[in-house]
Image: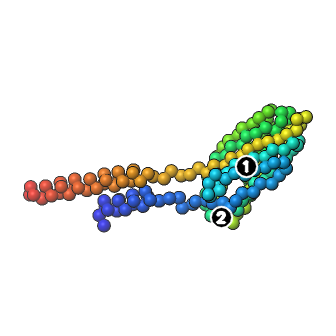
Amino acid sequence: MKTSTKLAAALAAMTLATSAEAVTFDTWSISGPGTTSVTSSNADNTDVTFSYNTMAFSGTWSATTTVLAGGTYDFSWLYNGMHAWFAAQEYLNVTSPTSQALVSSSSFGGFSYSGTSVLSLVAGDVLTFTFGGSNGDYNNFLNGTIALTENLPAVPLPATGAALLGAIGAMAVVRRRKTALASMAA
């Protein structure tokens, strides 16, 4: 097989490739005091928002799902809210299948934290995020929102691959012409 044909085949395979590690989750559930909600914004349940609101001095919530298709879950997270004003504490952890602290802090008034994380998951794993906090305020309330968004890998654009294939083809044509001209001159 000619080198240009091998290059073209490899490029076509790269252009058509998609992520082999597409993680998917079952429906999420949330437990804890007060009013809670879960909103998933894609079919894989990898982009999800949890919220809570309660009148209390402290509270802990857990959001849980089962991994349907394993792989690498590379995600961004955003945790914001308000746990009253005085001696407010807040935390956000991954507690299953591994243990990872994302936030453990104190605030005065509202808070907003963000970051990224990567988890290696296997089908059948139970993925759990635990979050909450406390306060020492007369206005005893806790409310917050956690948003998880999967960071998808960049996929080469088909137009880029087509342009590269065209350039390789053009180089092959030029090479053939030079070879033909050289044999005619001899």
| Disc 1 secondary structure class | strand
The first of marks 2 and 1 along the sequence is: 1
The reply to whether dot 2 and dot 1 touch (C-beta < 8 Å) is: no
| Residue that badge 2 annotates | 68
| Disc 2 secondary structure class | strand
Residue 184, percent across and down? 10, 58
Whether residue 25 is visible:
yes
| Residue that badge 1 annotates | 50
Q: Amino acid at mark 2?
A: Leu
Query: Is residue 136 shown left or right of residue 161?
Result: right
Q: Quadrant of residue 10?
A: bottom left
Q: Does 34 appear above or below 29?
A: above
**Image quarter of the C terminus:** bottom left
Label 2 CA crowd tier, 10 Å (few <14, some 14–19, many 20+): some
Residue at 61 percent of width and 51 percent of height: 150
- Disc 2 from disc 1: Cα separation: 20 Å
